[in-house]
Image (spheres, grey):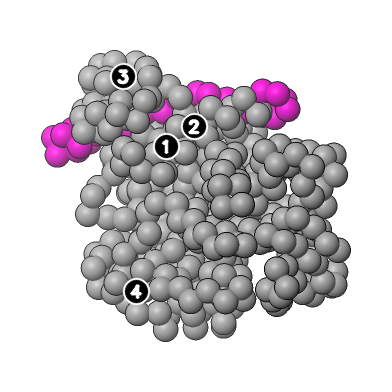
């Protein structure tokens, strides 16, 4: 099959990009290749389901700009398509004086990013909204919410196909060749596909797809599994909204928090531990190739050397329900071990540099006839339509 654009990856970023290609380049033909039998099976369907508004991100960064733009676009998309979502707001809670200073800086950062209506709450005002929360103050962020991302993926697929695009599932790309101004993508079971421009949105496997396209990368995807507990029916009464901690600049991950789910229930988590498979949602999931790629990468060991305490604590929380509960008690002191039970898990496709630093911003690599999305961490799901818009803008500028 010959097409104008070959998009590899049927997660929410790949789907959003394919749809934006159709709307921003009318008359073009788009073919999306997804290795699973359904779209949105991995990061897009295994996350906390939160609408992130851009509070945490450095002003002026690509992540901040696309998060602020993306949440507006995503809410409008859900309203138009009648997809379940709720803009319920969240509280970011400071538990001591050190965190209070960082909370004030976070408030300033949010205002610099253009967030309207954010509100600093003293302890009494905070307790009016969340009677069981700990801490001394909070920042209320009204823009944030919850959403059904798998439903967004299904709707994007429907629109792509309704616009004449082709979504091929069960089509794992095994070889890429650029010849005569065209890309040839060989797949496991669907044959070969040919396109004039390649867009790599392969998520957990984006570095490998880039390698198939001839790229030599200094970064590598290192998979981190995030494990959740869910609150029991008795425990759900302890939480009303989304409750988040103030980020600690010494640690690269946000820390555990409480999230209401769009179809009911409350999740608590996640931690962050090395996954032994890029699609390893259980502790027992092991893929030898994935594990070898991770443990032979110098960046992983440099990361561990920089964060030994955090690494140990995250691993401890993975195996100890009691330790996990203790971390949650920082935000909600009254929660008990009996109030939580094992929940789901997701795997984060984290790009890491050889020096052991996590790549925090979105990373798009342009080539004359290809574009690779090599890092799309949270809030990529929220910002997926804006990311797709930015990808297409960059593609059209090179033509």
Across and down, in percent, residue 176 comes to: 69, 74
Q: Earlier in the sequence, mark 3 or mark 1?
A: 1
Which residue corresponds to the image point at 62% horizontal and 25% vertical from the top-left? Answer: 76
The answer for how far apart the CA atoms under marks 3 and 2 are is: 20 Å
Residue mark closest to the camera, 4 vs 3: 4
Check disc 4 and report the residue beneath it. 354
Across and down, in percent, residue 381 comes to: 56, 44
Check disc 3 and report the residue beneath it. 119
The answer for how far apart the CA atoms under marks 2 and 4 are is: 32 Å
Across and down, in percent, residue 81 comes to: 73, 27
Image: magenta residue range: 79-102
Which residue corresponds to the image point at 27% horizontal and 55% vertical from the top-left? Answer: 251
Q: Identify the secondary structure beneath mark 4.
A: loop
Q: Identify the secondary structure beneath mark 3.
A: strand
Disc 1 + disc 2, Cβ < 8 Å = yes
Q: Earlier in the sequence, mark 4 or mark 3?
A: 3
Membership of 91 in magenta stretch: yes
User: Mark number for residue 365?
Assistant: none
Check disc 1 and report the residue beneath it. 65
Where residue 330 sits, quadrant-wise, is top left
Q: Earlier in the sequence, mark 2 or mark 4?
A: 2
Check disc 2 and report the residue beneath it. 69
Above or below: residue 309 compared with residue 54: below
Which residue corresponds to the image point at 28% horizontal and 39% vertical from the top-left? Answer: 246
- Front residue of this view, candidates 311 and 253: 253
């Amino acid at each position: 099959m010959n097409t104008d654009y070959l998009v590899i990856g049927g997660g929410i970023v790949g789907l959003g990009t394919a749809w934006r290609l159709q709307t921003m380049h009318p008359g073009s033909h788009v073919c999306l290749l997804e290795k699973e039998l359904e779209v949105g099976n991995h990061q897009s369907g295994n996350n906390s389901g939160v609408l992130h508004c851009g509070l945490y991100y450095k002003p002026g960064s690509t992540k901040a700009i696309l998060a602020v733009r993306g949440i507006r676009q995503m809410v409008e998309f859900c309203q138009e398509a009648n997809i379940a979502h709720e803009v319920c707001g969240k509280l970011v809670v400071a538990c001591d004086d050190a965190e209070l200073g960082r909370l004030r800086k976070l408030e300033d950062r949010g205002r610099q990013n253009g967030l309207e209506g954010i509100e600093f709450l003293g302890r009494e005002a905070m307790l009016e909204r969340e009677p069981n929360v700990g801490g001394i103050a909070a920042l209320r962020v009204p823009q944030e919410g919850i959403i059904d991302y798998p439903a967004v993926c299904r709707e994007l697929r429907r629109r792509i196909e309704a616009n004449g695009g082709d979504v091929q599932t069960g089509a794992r790309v095994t070889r890429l060749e650029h010849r005569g101004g065209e890309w040839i993508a060989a797949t496991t079971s669907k044959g070969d596909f040919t396109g004039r421009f390649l867009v790599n949105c392969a998520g957990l496997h984006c570095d490998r797809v880039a390698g198939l396209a001839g790229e030599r990368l200094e970064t590598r995807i290192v998979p981190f599994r995030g494990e959740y507990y869910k609150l029991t029916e008795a425990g759900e009464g302890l939480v009303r909204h989304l409750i988040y901690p103030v980020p600690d600049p010494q640690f690269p991950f946000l820390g555990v928090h409480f999230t209401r789910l769009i179809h009911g229930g409350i999740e608590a988590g996640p931690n962050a531990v090395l996954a032994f498979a890029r699609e390893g949602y259980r502790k027992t999931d092991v893929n030898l190739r994935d594990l070898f790629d991770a443990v032979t990468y110098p960046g992983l060991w440099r990361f561990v050397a920089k964060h030994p305490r955090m690494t140990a604590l995250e691993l401890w929380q993975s195996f100890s329900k009691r330790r996990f509960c203790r971390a949650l008690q920082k935000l909600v002191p009254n929660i008990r071990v009996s109030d939580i039970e094992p929940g789901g898990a997701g795997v984060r496709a984290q790009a890491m540099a050889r020096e052991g630093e996590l790549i925090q911003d979105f990373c798009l690599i342009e080539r004359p006839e290809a574009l690779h999305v090599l890092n799309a961490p949270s809030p990529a799901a929220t910002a997926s339509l804006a990311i797709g818009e930015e990808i297409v803008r960059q593609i059209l500028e090179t033509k």
